[in-house]
Image: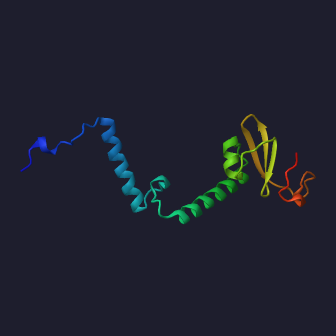
């Protein structure tokens, strides 16, 4: 029979570390059972599935931002449009981001009748 001295961990662990280990183990188990979505716990071997999931999430978030008209930060606009905005009005891929104030942006679709629409230029950069 094992004595209590033999059951102790070889390294001393404080209460915060022990709680973290227990919580991490619980999160892993819940993610494996499919009860909770924790993408940062996913295996690295499913790269294609992960890229597809990220693309779908980005498209869903873009649709939600367009639908609600919610104000976005500069980093959020950069994430949704795929490039950090460099001017007061940025057009990319049929979307327009307009700067409302410092670090506040609105995302909308390109209007077909918009006089500032220069789609015939392709990706040529205007200075």
Give the residue drawn at x 67%, y 45%.
Answer: 76
**Image position, residue 124 (x, y; %):** 85, 55
**Image position, residue 49 (x, y; %):** 54, 65
Residue 10, located in which quarter of the rendered image?
top left
Residue 14, located in which quarter of the rendered image?
top left
Left or right of residue 102: residue 37: left
Outermost residue, left side: 1
Return the residue nearer the eye: 9 or 103: 9
Left or right of residue 98: residue 37: left
Give the residue drawn at x 24%, y 39%.
Answer: 11
**Image position, residue 93 (x, y; %):** 77, 58
Total of numbered circles in the picture?
A: 0
Left or right of residue 52: residue 2: left
**Image position, residue 65 (x, y; %):** 70, 51
* Quadrant of the rendering where the C terminus is positioned: top right
Give the residue drawn at x 6%, y 50%.
Answer: 1
């Amino acid at each position: 029979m094992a004595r209590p001295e033999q059951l102790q961990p070889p390294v001393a662990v404080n209460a915060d570390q022990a709680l973290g280990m227990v919580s991490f183990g619980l999160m892993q188990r819940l993610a494996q059972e499919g009860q909770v979505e924790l993408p940062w716990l996913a295996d690295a071997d499913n790269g294609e599935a992960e890229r597809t999931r990220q693309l779908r999430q980005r498209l869903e978030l873009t649709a939600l931002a367009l639908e609600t008209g919610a104000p976005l930060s500069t980093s959020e606009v950069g994430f949704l449009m795929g490039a950090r905005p460099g001017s007061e009005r940025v057009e990319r891929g049929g979307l327009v981001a307009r700067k409302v104030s410092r670090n506040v942006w609105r995302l909308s679709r390109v209007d077909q009748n918009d006089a500032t629409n220069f789609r015939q230029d392709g990706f040529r950069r205007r200075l």
